[in-house]
Amino acid sequence: MIKQILILIFLFTLLAALQITVVPLISISGIAPNLLIVLITFYALKNGQSFAILLGFTFGFLFDLISGGVIGVNMFAMTISGFIAGYFYNENKIEINIATMNLFYINLVVATVYSFLYTLIAAAGPELNLFILLVEGSFLPAVYTSVFALPVLVAMPKRELR
């Protein structure tokens, strides 16, 4: 158990550092992926909804502190994203959800929810219209985030899936 927590802390530290330093360099017209959402989705599919909610809350709060953003925005959006990701947890289909394209599709849904909530709260203003909120603020960052779930798919050991 301690080993799993240490691995999770290491992954959070690595991905948070990449999110702050490298991701702004690879953003396209202000559209950037969120690597922590991939991690939350992966652990939600592996450990369930309660764990994902706690993980989303913790990661969001810590990332708000580290990134210097508005405290609570990432925390709220990642907590709700963990809640949504937990709906896809099924004890009998853990390997199928993690080792197939299901991970990509589930991550797309979760990242869309995260991006929508984050954009709605962080960029709320009179100039924000529904089209920009749904496409530029939600769907495009979610697709970009889900692309980063593909290396996880490739790295997962493939067994006979039924």
Image (spheres, rainbow, N blue to C red):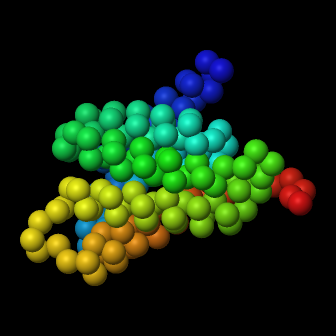
The residue closer to the viewer here, 24 or 149, is 149
Instruction: Check the image and name the residue furthest to the left.
Output: 126
Spot occupied by residue 54 in the image (x, y as percentages of width and height)? 48, 34
Which quadrant would residue 76 be assigned to in this image? Answer: top left
Name the residue rendered at 23%, 56% in the picture: 121
The residue closer to the viewer here, 159 or 129, is 129
Name the residue rendered at 34%, 77% in the picture: 135
Spot occupied by residue 127 in the image (x, y as percentages of width and height)? 11, 74
Instruction: Check the image and name the residue furthest to the top.
Output: 2
- In the rendered view, tell whether residue 12 sits above or below residue 74: above
The C terminus - image quarter: bottom right
Name the residue rendered at 25%, 62% in the picture: 120
Name the residue rendered at 63%, 59% in the picture: 103
161 to the left or right of 17: right
The N terminus - image quarter: top right
Instruction: Check the image and name the residue furthest to the bottom.
Output: 131
Spot occupied by residue 55 in the image (x, y as percentages of width and height)? 48, 36
- In the rendered view, tell whether residue 63 sits above or below residue 128: above
Residue 150 appears in view: no
